[in-house]
Image (cartoon, grey):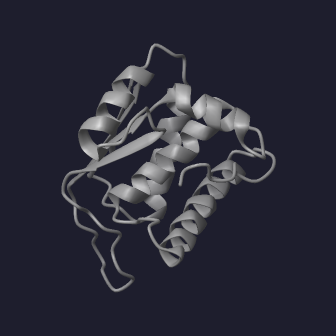
Amino acid sequence: MSIDVNNESGREIDERAILGIARYALARMRIHPLSELSVIAVDTDAMEQLHKQWMDLPGPTDVMSFPMDELRPPSKDEDEPPQGLLGDIVLCPDVAEKQGADAPTKHSMDEELQMLTVHGMLHLLGYDHETPGERTEMFGLQAAIVDGWRAERGLEGPSPAPTTA
């Protein structure tokens, strides 16, 4: 699995944890091991610009996903998942820090960035949360992946509750 993590945010972030949770999530979703993913952390100004340019929405957001080959998790009947470019996940540590501090289950910026990495990856894989059913499926899968990753590392407690809508 080729995963690039680039920090252009000017903030210190746990890049190894982002890489680790991305690898765990891709393996759990049975994405081809030769597929490629890019994760980029940017500052508030850059995220605000991307949010306006691509979503026509004001202000910065926490995570944006830009799919490339529109890979999907293989069905249970498929032996070999397809290989390709998954796409880009763009994270904003400043927004993540605020969301973690404001969440009912207060948590660190890095914990929020880990959750947002999984959230962004699920978007790259075609998941969405527009309808109640989609929201239940996506956020349930997101929590299962983050909880599984945390449990493998002996981290205490459940994953942070989703703050992304």
The foreground one among 124 and 43 is 43
Q: Nearer the viewer, residue 101 or 159?
A: 101
Q: Residue at x 72, y 43 (%)?
A: 103
Q: Vertical placement of 145 versus 116: above or below?
A: below
**Which residue is the extreme one toward the right?**
156
Which picture quadrant has residue 74?
bottom left
> Which residue sits at x=52%, y=78%?
133
Expressed as whole percent of the image width and height from the top left, the position of residue 40 reads 37, 31
Please report the residue visible at 44 percent of the width from the left and 41 percent of the height from the top. Answer: 63
Q: In this image, 157 relative to 63: left or right?
A: right
Viewer-nearest residue: 48 or 69: 48
User: Residue 3 location, x and y as percent?
Assistant: 35, 39
Query: Is residue 83 depicted above or below 73 in this figure?
Result: above
How many dots with numbers?
0
- Return the x and y of residue 162 as percentages of the image width and height: 62, 53
Q: Is residue 76 above or below residue 64?
A: below
**Residue 87 visible to the viewer:** yes
Q: Where 135 falls versus 151 (above or below)?
A: below
Is residue 36 in view from this perspective? no
Q: Residue furthest toward the bottom? A: 77
Percent x, y of residue 77: 34, 86
Left or right? Give the position of 138 relative to 151: left
